[in-house]
Image: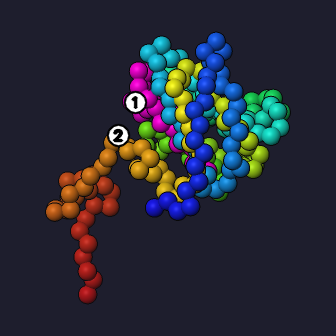
């Protein structure tokens, strides 16, 4: 359940000559703040990035860079114009970022890190390297078209009401998960001690 929903909706225009958007101001971020970004990944897309820019020029609190040509995502921050230590991860089965389709990215602010969901499923986390209060703008660069975003408060992460996950685990409770538990090291029956 979302209480006190505060929305800021924007359609950002990306300059196709430079593949860069103009930085768009955000409301001040705090734990429970969320930003949903939706965009179309064209067939010839190589990479795109989502940046949370800070008050001080040259500082980027979060750089989320999907490198489609290499099959991985980079997370980083930039302090006083210098990139810091890069973190990378590969999408499982390369299904998170498909060309010729829309992608939905949710950035959720917790007490100490950004949680990022892609298409309704948790993708990665990135610990704060700069104060959350320093973030002022959203910038999107690269091969992403028809970009839109919303900023609001969120109390469920990732919220299936925003973007339904593509892989949903469903369990039938009419019988125990014996077959599933056979491979577990703690497999066994619970016996009541008398």
Q: State yes or no: discs 2 and 1 in contact (Cβ < 8 Å).
A: yes
Name the residue at 82% across, 33% down: 57
Q: Residues within 10 Å of mark 2 (few under 14, many from 20)?
A: few
Q: Position of residue 52 (x, y in %)?
A: 68, 37
Quadrant assignment, res 37: top right
Quadrant assignment, res 66: top right
- Give the structural element (helix, strand or loop) at label 2: loop
Q: Is residue 161 left or right of residue 128?
A: left
Vertical placement of residue 171 versus 167, above or below: below
Between discs 2 and 1, the one toward the N terminus: 1
Relative to the observer, which residue lies in front, 44 or 177? 44
Name the residue at 26% across, 52% down: 170
Vertical placement of residue 59 versus 178, above or below: above
Q: Which residue is tagged 1?
A: 95
Mark yes or no: residue 108 visible: yes
Name the residue at 45% across, 51% down: 159
Q: Which residues are magenta?
A: 89-109
- Give the structural element (helix, strand or loop) at label 1: loop
**In the image, is residue 178 part of the stretch drawn in magenta?**
no
Relative to the observer, which residue lies in front, 174 or 40? 40
Q: Is residue 170 left or right of residue 73?
A: left
């Amino acid at each position: 359940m979302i209480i006190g929903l505060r929305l800021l909706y924007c359609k950002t225009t990306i300059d196709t000559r430079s593949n860069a958007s103009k930085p768009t101001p955000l409301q001040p971020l705090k734990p429970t703040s969320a930003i949903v970004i939706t965009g179309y990944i064209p067939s010839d897309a190589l990479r795109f990035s989502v940046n949370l820019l800070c008050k001080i020029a040259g500082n980027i609190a979060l750089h989320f860079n999907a490198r489609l040509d290499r099959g991985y995502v980079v997370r980083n921050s930039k302090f006083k114009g210098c990139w810091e230590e890069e973190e990378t991860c590969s999408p499982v089965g390369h299904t998170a970022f498909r060309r010729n389709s829309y992608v939905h990215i949710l950035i959720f602010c917790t007490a100490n890190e950004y949680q990022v969901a892609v298409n309704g499923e948790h993708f990665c986390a990135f610990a704060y390297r700069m104060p959350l209060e320093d973030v002022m703008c959203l910038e999107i660069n690269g091969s992403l078209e028809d970009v839109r975003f919303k900023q609001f408060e969120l109390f469920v992460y990732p919220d299936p009401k925003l973007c339904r996950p593509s892989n949903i685990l469903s369990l039938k409770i009419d019988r125990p998960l014996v077959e599933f538990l056979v491979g577990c090291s703690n497999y066994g029956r619970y016996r009541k001690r008398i």
